[in-house]
Amino acid sequence: MSRALTSGPMEAGALFARAGVDFSTYERLTGLIHDGAFDLKAWEVFLQLLQAQLRANYVSLVLLPDLAGPGLPILFAGEARPALLTAYTDVLHGLDPFVDLPRDCMLGVEALISEADWLDSVVYRNCLAPLGIRHLAGADLDVGGEAVCRFRICRSADSGPFGEAERALCGLLLPHLKRALRARALMEGSDRERRLYAGTLERLAVGTLWVDRRCHVLGSNRVADEILATGDGLRLVGRELRPGLRAERAQLLAMVARVEGQRGPGPGLVEGMTLTRPSGRPHLGVLVRPVPATGGADYGPCPAAVLHISDVERSVGASPALLRSLFGLTGAESALVLLLVEGLTLDEAAARQDISRHTARSQLRSIFAKTGVTRQTELLRRVLRSVVPLG
């Protein structure tokens, strides 16, 4: 497989004719490739089917910028040999000549190194030959950023070198594989951002929900799950998010619809409301903001809005250092604000800090001046909105 393989629209028909594969097999292979964007098990089945189709002893996908990177899977079809794989990962990978290939094209190892040098290489003699691998072909697929997927096909000496049919089949499949990998990379990147965002807001004791335009929940953090579990003012019916009062339900749906229309590169529209709790406990505060546009195609359910739910009975989790940074408060002023946010009255906060009511009122006047508010309710709203990222 010494020639580079790519396939544009004009070439696909000719490649299919040379590949010698029936349409149902081709359709199954490409279907599994695209299904793998959502379920890695589909890629495992794809590799097994391709292994049989190409008479290969191993077919693999390495979903890493480099093989030693953490946390992402290596998928392969073929007999597992963990000891040899460990030796390759730990020692021989740096000596492998078949890495850092030209992006997005299929090459045989003979395109990069002479046959004599390949058969005499440390990697071949110590790692590949014991696995029965004689012929090797592969592609490094650019999936965006620094991420590269390594696609490799190995054959034994008995199966012979890769021929015209194998080159044509790989040329047909490679564009599909790259598109599916890009789709998965986009989704995984979005999921990582959501998990990081949700985790940050958990530390601030703020519930976070991602919803579609019908207020069906697509994701949540731990704090939101705990608020929903009480069923007090806000609950889940199946996947649908429902405020307790019909009027508040209609208001929330209208807000989600409005902010969805503001999706774009900027911060977009942010709206807020309160939700009545039948138990008589303090109202829940809800901020509704749009989900930023990804700049690419949407894969799978796409959130229409992010909801931030605040419960004054929970500690906001903001640190005195954060309040000093945001508003220029002193340490004593920051401590007072945090107690007020937790729901204490000014007298209770003064007692908790072991200061006089006169001192607490003096600190509160200074806090009002620094934060630009004139009432305690405005102060609490300002602090809550400031510690919840809205961009």
Image (cartoon, rainbow, N blue to C red):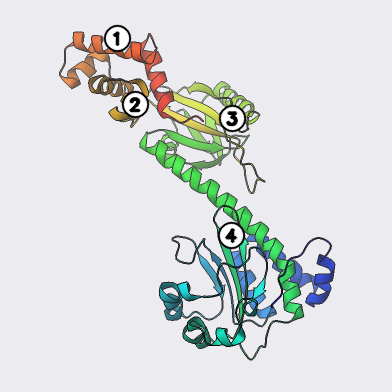
Residues at circles 1 and 3 in contact by the CB criterion of under 8 Å: no
Q: Secondary structure at mark 3?
A: loop
Marks 1, 3: nearer the viewer: 3
Query: Mark 2 or mark 1, which is nearer the start of the sequence?
Result: 2
Q: Residue at x 52, y 87 (%)?
A: 120
From the top left corner, tell me how far across and down residue 49 is, in percent: 66, 74
Marks 2, 4: nearer the viewer: 2
Q: Is residue 53 left or right of residue 227?
A: right
Mark 3 crowd level (few <14, some 14–19, many ≥20, 10 Å Cα): few
Q: Could you tell me the amino acid type at mark 1?
A: Arg
Q: Could you tell me the amino acid type at mark 4?
A: Asp
Marks 3, 4: nearer the viewer: 3
Mark 1 crowd level (few <14, some 14–19, many ≥20, 10 Å Cα): some
In front of the other: 164 or 35: 164
| Separation (CA) of disc 1 from disc 4 | 57 Å
Residues at circles 1 and 2 in contact by the CB criterion of under 8 Å: no
Residue position for label 2: 325
Query: Mark 4 or mark 1, which is nearer the start of the sequence?
Result: 4
Q: Residue at x 41, y 33 (%)?
A: 206
Disc number placed over residue 365 in the picture, else none: 1
Please identify the quadrant where the N terminus is shown. Answer: bottom right
Q: Is residue 157 left or right of residue 391?
A: right
Residues at circles 1 and 4 in contact by the CB criterion of under 8 Å: no
| Separation (CA) of disc 3 from disc 4 | 32 Å
Q: Could you tell me the amino acid type at mark 3?
A: Gly
Q: Secondary structure at mark 2?
A: helix
Residue position for label 3: 266
Disc number placed over residue 39 in the picture, else none: 4
In front of the other: 252 or 72: 72
| Separation (CA) of disc 3 from disc 2 | 24 Å
Mark 2 crowd level (few <14, some 14–19, many ≥20, 10 Å Cα): few
Q: Secondary structure at mark 1?
A: helix
